[in-house]
Image (spheres, helix red, strand yellow):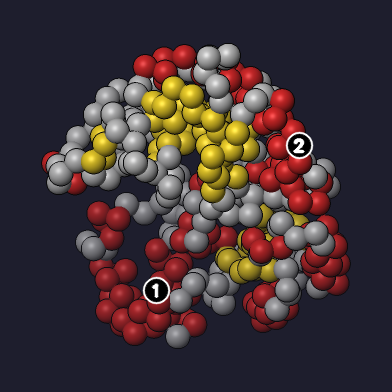
Amino acid sequence: MKKVIRKFVSMLMVNLSVDDRNGAPTSSNALDPKKLWSHKPIMRTLKSATVPLLALCLAPFSASALLMRDNGPEPVIVQVKESIRLSMDLYAQLQNLAALEASLGVSVEKRWVGSKYLELVTFPSDFTEEDALSVITRLEQSPSVEQVVAVSAFNLVFGSIDFAHEYAPDDVIPEAILRGVDSGPTIPVDPSSLQQPHVPNQFIVAWKPEYIWNAAQTGFLQTIADFNASEDCRVISESSASLNELVQVLEFDDSTASLLDKLEQYATSGWVEYAQPNYLYYASDIPRHQRKKRSQFNRTHEMKRSSAGLAAPIRSGLFHYPPAAQPHREIAE
């Protein structure tokens, strides 16, 4: 089956290559899917490999079949487990992984760190395929490794967003990026957002993940409480979709301060991803397939629904109301 898979991957990735100058994966000339079914050699391979290919589709693609080049086995991409990125011993685990890679005689050429932590690992030119597969097995057994993927198959597993931020092996990566909790700059408050129906004395804030992921250890939860108190705001509800997320609905006395002032105070604190009004909705019997986008909203500070039915910024371009809901009446009533 290994030979069949190797042959299929070689043909399917015929235009997929790695830039020999820097080793970065590229798929700019990937095979047109529309031409796949008219490609007779590929169709013969498909027909002769139905069962193996079904098994391949039902299981994650690993580096069990490597393409051999003139300069040795093709590189592989090692993904670090997401579960360790927020652990307190992350740095120790990365050091252990680096020590393992050095002991196996392989080199880390570059790293991509963002939504995932990926390493481009190359083999010595005198390595045979068996040597490389043995190394891959050792890497896959590491408690720090999620998976090992051959470069020729990278686009079957990873997306382009996973390669957005590139670092050299010896670059110092900021901790928020290393842990995958970097949220970027706060989205500025858009005064026109107050034109949408909302609760006059309430607003929603999302605290930045880089402060929330270890807030219990750093005391940032108390910082949040103190800041809310200094702004005369009361928490009426909060939600956390993950360990590094915290969204709060805050209430204040609108006879002493305006909603716009409150939004700007929180947005300029540097601690929140965004601050926005608490929008109103009312129930609707309009079927989902008949619902249309209700209004054009600012293209830089759009909204999306959270699981709690609260709006949160995105960059999709239009304002979407929750299922079976339109503005003017609060769902929670």
**Cα distance in 3D space between marks 1 and 2:** 49 Å
- Amino acid on which the number 2 mark rests in the picture: Thr
Q: Position of residue 170 (x, y in %)?
A: 83, 47
Which residue is disc 1 drawn over? 57
Question: Looking at the image, is 14 positioned above or below residue 8?
Answer: above
Q: Quadrant of the C terminus?
A: top left
For marks 1 and 2, the one nearer the N-term is 1
Rendered residue at 49%/28% (across/down): 202
Q: Position of 18 compared to 83: left or right?
A: left
Residue 183 placement: quadrant: top right
Rendered residue at 82%/62% (across/down): 89
Residue 98 placement: quadrant: bottom right
Is residue 121 among what the camera can see? Answer: no
Is residue 328 among what the camera can see? Answer: yes
- Amino acid on which the number 1 mark rests in the picture: Cys
Q: Position of residue 155 (x, y in %)?
A: 48, 56
Nearest-to-viewer mark from 1 and 2:
2
Secondary structure category for the residue under label 2? helix
Secondary structure category for the residue under label 1? helix
Q: Position of residue 205 (x, y in %)?
A: 56, 33
Which residue is disc 2 drawn over? 223
